[in-house]
Image (cartoon, rainbow, N blue to C red):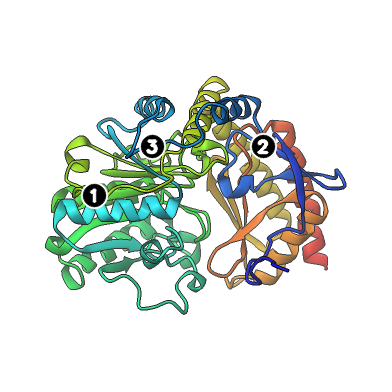
Amino acid sequence: MAELSPVLKQATPVLAARGEGVYLYDEQDRRYLDFTAGIGVTSTGHCHPRVVEAAQRQVGTLIHGQYTTVMHRPLLRLTERLGEVLPTGLDRLFYVNSGSEAVEAAVRLARQATGRQNIVAFQGGFHGRTMGAGALTTSGVKVRAGIGPMMPGVVFTPFPEAYRHRTSEAEAVRSALAEFDQLLVTVSSPRDTAAIIIEPVLGEGGYLPAPPAFLAGLRERADRHAILLIVDEVQTGVGRTGRFWGHDHAGIRPDILITAKGLASGFPLSAIAAPEELMGQAWPGSQGGTYGGNAVAAAAALATLDVVRDENLVENAAEQGARLQEGLRKVAAEHPVIGDVRGLGLMVGNEFSTPDGTPDTATATRAHQAAAERGLLLLTCGPHGNVVRMIPPLIVTAEQVDDAVGLWAEAVRDAVNG
């Protein structure tokens, strides 16, 4: 009898039977408020009627048209539609299936276009589990352990973490940019450096927003040294942070943008976007893949983008995200074990720590489990697993946010007292 791999561990005890909007239902029809959204994937909620209809219609006409063999209209329409929301000038797209694949495609493009090898990544960043993407990942050793040596040419520099270092945001930015400058004169010469890759908000690394001044500083240095700036919007894109793209908060433009997760409301689809001149420097045959740009996923993505626009979900993410953080901060004020509440839009983390700043993984774990028992599904993140993150679908209402905060308050109380 075959079974799933024993190393696959569920974050919650739920056996999901169906989903509707912000809710999941188990086989006994118990309802759970889902603030995981499939790790930020179900951006329009579970089974949004417009997404379901688009996917069902497409399944009945063309399921798969391999797009380097034949072309299909859903992918052409999606490309045109994305052109309306991508940063100005990023007008060429390459589609694959997962965030990891898109990350590796971005790195491949950067190396081929510049003729340089090195990639600068940030401590705490998560870019995927495949060998290339894993080499860029330091959100936790579980991604890298036991599989070395990793892909060469990757160097790491600090991300500005004000809370961890007990300093101001301005000082954290100043220090991190100084370390970046030092790296360029001690480890990776600009002439050897193809690209910088960064998440606008560290995801698995602890839900840490990159300060706008830091992203602006990286953009300036990339321009000065002719280094490409890759922005990994796998989790932050398509409205998650209260702007359409996470980097919009800093007013910068990437050279290469990576998108996935919320793009197709649960269907596997990812892409990289770059200017025509840059994308044209990819070597012939370097871009391809059997399932990339799948017709059903493309149709679902088109419906997703329409729902995001028509239902004002970017604005809702900003509004409900502010409401969520306000409620979570009230909970934290009553429980000092929550040392920090932070995030952008509907991407919010609660960091558990002791008075001296030591990560309190045990209490975070108890709070996470207690929330699930009460019907609120959450996830943990951070190198120590001491950050409980909240990622509801972008359709979440004020009432549902308030319900989640109430359940969270009870869960934290149980965790602290238990």
Callout 3 secondary element: helix
Q: Residue 351: in sight, yes or no?
A: no
Q: Amino acid at mark 1?
A: Gly
Q: Residue 79: in sight, yes or no?
A: yes
The residue drawn where x is 58% and y is 50% is 39
Q: Amino acid at mark 3?
A: Asp
Of badges 1 and 3, the one in the foreground is: 1
Residue 189 x, y percent position in the rendering: 15, 66
Of badges 2 and 3, the one in the foreground is: 2
Closer to us: 388 or 22: 22
Farthest-out residue, left = 191
Mark closer to the chain start, 2 or 1 = 2
Residue at numbered disc 3: 248
Farthest-out residue, right = 28
The residue drawn where x is 65% and y is 41% is 324
Residue at numbered disc 1: 285
The C terminus - image quarter: bottom right
In the figure, is residue 167 to the left or right of 186?
A: right
